Image: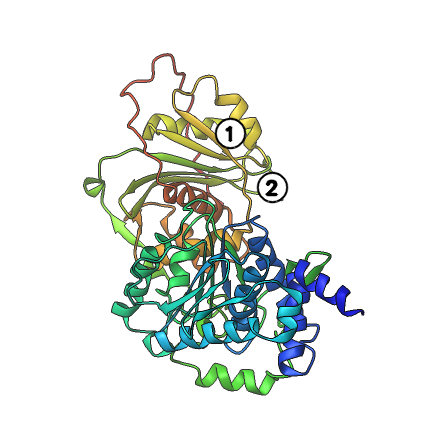
Amino acid sequence: MHTASVETLIRSDFGAFVGYAFRMQHGELLGNQLYLKAMIYVISGLIEGKINRVLVNLPAQHAKSYVGTICLAAYLLGINPRLRILLVAYNDSFAESLCRKIRDLMQSSWYQRAFATRIKEGHSRANDFETTAGGGVFAAGATGAITGRSADFIIYDDPHEIGDWNNERKLELVWANFNTVLSRLHDKVRGRVIVVAHRVSENDLSSHLLAEQGWTYLRLPLVAVRRRTYKLGHGEWVREKGDVLRPSAYPTREIERLRRTQLEPPFELFHQQGLGAQGSLKIRREHFQSFEEFQLPIGPVVLSIDPGFDSGLKASRSVIQAWKPHGKQHYLLGEFCQQCDADELRRAFWFFVKKWHPSIALIEDTANGPALYSAVRRKARFELRRVKPGEAKAVRFDRHRRKIRTGKIFLPALAAWRTEFIEELVAFPGDFDDRVDAMTQYLDFADAGERLTLPPARFNGLVLLASNYPGRRR
């Protein structure tokens, strides 16, 4: 390809830039590695402003820093030399080394032929350099102080040292400092942030971000735990269960060795990004707390409804759950879970209304959900909200895994459905997931922090048709 054509291509396409930069720096092709294409596709959406928050979890030694930090920062400054980038890593030395590599790439002859961006003379320190247009990169450690710096773009690269995997104080310090760093964004709404990291702990920065809304996640375990499809821009990558990201570097014998020897941090975190079926993040029965009736806090109630399809042996189950939030704790007051038709679901709904007096009902807009909404909306004297699930079940569940594992879910001590509820969550992903869907729908709503008010003590004109609450369970 003609030189001018190459320069035009790498200015307009981040993936082409990454491939060309790797070949020029290392003297070899990056290769047709689909996991890198998936990463480049997600990051390209960040560059173009289609998304503002990205979390990438990849095992160590899979070029995530090269693509997600070094190439990203150099490319951003190439297309916009006024951009102010704040680069944060687990300590000052690592942050400085990344910043130096960005600077060296930008000073290469091929980069300067492709882009007009130049580094300002006299302001080119290893951890802090400016462009002649006023942009640049400032690098610092994840627990250090950042004063007097504003940013248009924040890159967080491996915020935790591996040795701190079980140091709760340092893990929490990184999370606290992350929020301070976010405050340095010049534009709090459209300012962009990327975190590229391998997992080290169930309480690491990634675990907090997985519980946040508004983030786009790319989580790639070393060994695929289930079949999944990833977008690549002009195509898709179907990754089958058992596929290894880099099979030539990680043959079966090496993976078996790592499973035996990688204990600190655990293999299922460090290499599998918390996605392994046998990981230390697995939900266990002892994670669920109990409460007695007299221990219930005062507050509003939220109904969460996952509607199924009609009744019959092959029908899916419908679930209604009544939840009461109290700070960071969540009390499940009652549950209906059975195969039923639209009329039975409606009767169960009014039973829950009569018993719990909810402030809002969340109705998943699938299966019999639209029919339920239409049937009850005129008589309900509280908010009904139709919810369209936009993410895979596993993604929604993983966002709240930390809440469950830290004892934030409370169940009635003597509820007849308690054991079945726990077993379904412990087994997820398993044969049934309707209870999981209803729970994650509620927890997503609770995380949004909407202020709820208690409903009036009496519902004037409301007809409650649920004196015969269906008692059967499946």
Badge 1 element = helix
Disc 2 residue type? Ala
Q: Residue furthest top?
A: 461
Disc 1 residue type? Glu
Near mark 1 (Cα within 10 A), the count class, few <14, some 14-19 or many ≥20, is some
Residue at position x 33%, y 59% from top? 287
Q: Is any part of residue 423 visible from this angle?
A: no
Near mark 2 (Cα within 10 A), the count class, few <14, some 14-19 or many ≥20, is some
Residue at position x 31%, y 62% from top? 146
In percent of width and height, residue 422 lies at 39, 54
Q: Is any part of residue 22 visible from this angle?
A: yes
**Of the numbered discs in the image, which one, if any, rests on residue 315?**
2
Where residue 4 sits, quadrant-wise, is bottom right
Q: Are marks 2 and 1 in contact (CB under 8 Å)?
A: no
In the image, 348 versus 33, the foreground residue is: 33
In percent of width and height, residue 202 lies at 37, 66
